[in-house]
Amino acid sequence: MDDYALQSELEAMAGNAGMSMTNDEGQTAEGIGKTMARWQKLFKLEPDDAVERIMEHRQDLTRMRMSDDHWETVRNEAESHGHDRESYEYELELQKKRALLPDLMSVAGGPADDRMTYLVELSGPLATRSDVQRAAGLEHEPALVKGRNVEDERRVYLCCIDGKAKMAILTWATGYRRRPFPRYASLSQLLLNPSGNLEVKEDPVAIPCIRRGRVSIRDQTFRSDTVMPQVQTYKLNPTKLIPNSPYPLLHYPGLLADIADCNAGEVYELFTGNGWEPQWIYRYGPTQVSHYHSHAHECMAVLTGHATIRFGVADTSDDLEASTNGAAHEDGGVEIEAKAGDVFLLPAGVSHKTYRTNPPAEFKLMTPGDGHHIAADDPKKALSEIELSGFTMLGAYPKGSAWDSCSGGEHADQMQSVWDVEKPQLDPVLGDAREGIRGLWN
């Protein structure tokens, strides 16, 4: 939607509001700008998408209407999440659609759908033809089509797939549905008919982020939506002993389980392609000393097992039992349950302590070398051949970085030097997508 169309729809919505200046509770209706902002935040929508969704919701005469008693029952909790009555009704509609997803996918995957050719843009977790091949369960890589984004003239690449592959990708996309209520967005149109017609109406798959655009191919214009992964951010303030960082800690839950099958060789290829150098795979023991890196940003990818990781605070005792299970650590920080497929992006200065690992095992460096590089002629092959056990993570750093280890207090008077470590150009997983560090580390 261009700026003119967006303005027209805003004016139309304002007109509708003018004809009915009260809401369902008999109160003066809020301005459209405030409503739009609420929907953008709750459902992770771009401005034009928010307008479309609000218009569709208000014009849907068959939509579910919540009773006054129901609203009064859930009102306090709903409003604590930022909802008003209208947006909460829309959230319930999304939940209903998600519950019906298996039936909807069966209908959409009928014989007529098998005869259709679809396009999927190569971006984010579907960044390469091999990514699409894995997600769709194809024997061979799909054909590639080149195009150009109409809005910003950037070149885009798309894969051609059939209806069966389309349904496989929709099933694969549901793997991103991990964030609890109310942080859901609905997947609008992941796949496109190259004739220019949108064959599948909204597919109600819960995913965390939508990015839209229009693509021109052979003088035809197509609408393109790409799926982006869930990203959880944590702002960790400095403590007396730990610098932490002005940049947030980033957590991509389960991302590698879908795009690289947690295969160390595949992860190596993905990271190096984005300018990050894998330097180690460690199998973690029951606990460790909390520590941070003062010269390098770090990416940790969970390959096997699960554990708890405490970020942002220092240990205050050499007694590991006391600092792990007792109170011998600074106040604050955040504890995250890590599992295979998770990716963590740690700005320089953010402390971390891994413990309660499962399956239980002894601490061990699994890669050849000293933990600062992979000592092999073919690192990808070497990583692929490692037999992993216990809770294991792969560590990577921007190319040219050398990591150190600080337990707390070393930079109490020079935290700025840690905060000034140069930001990498690309996210190790998402590349130049603004859903990664390019947009979140500002």
Image (cartoon, grey):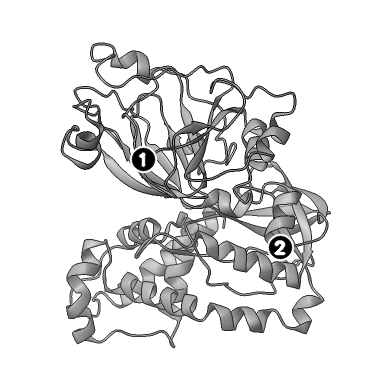
Residue 11 visible to the viewer: yes
Residue 96, how many percent across, how many down? 43, 80
User: Residue at horizontal 37%, vertical 70%?
Assistant: 15
Q: Nearer the viewer, residue 190 or 341?
A: 341
Quarter the N terminus occupies: bottom right
Task: Establish if 21 lies above or below 406.
Answer: below
Q: Nearer the viewer, residue 50 or 398?
A: 398
In the displayed orientation, state which residue is furthest to the front: 362
User: Residue at horizontal 67%, vertical 47%?
Assistant: 127
Quarter the C terminus occupies: top left
Residue 174, how many percent across, how many down? 54, 65
Q: CA distance from mark 2 to mark 1?
A: 38 Å
Residue 330, how many percent across, how many down? 18, 32
| Secondary structure state at the residue bearing disc 1 | loop
Residue 223, how many percent across, how many down? 66, 60
Residue type for callout 2: Ala
User: Residue at horizontal 67%, vertical 59%?
Assistant: 135
Q: Is residue 61 left or right of residue 279?
A: left
Residue marked by disc 1: 286
User: Residue at horizontal 75%, vertical 78%?
Assistant: 113
Give the number of marks.
2
Question: Which tag is nearer the camera, tag 2 or tag 1?
Answer: 1
Label placed on residue 57: none
Residue type for callout 1: Pro
Q: Is residue 150 left or right of residue 37?
A: right
Q: Are marks 2 and 1 in contact (CB under 8 Å)?
A: no
Q: Nearer the viewer, residue 66 or 270?
A: 270
Task: Establish if 64 lies above or below 297.
Answer: below
Residue marked by disc 2: 136
Quarter of the image for residue 161 reads bottom right
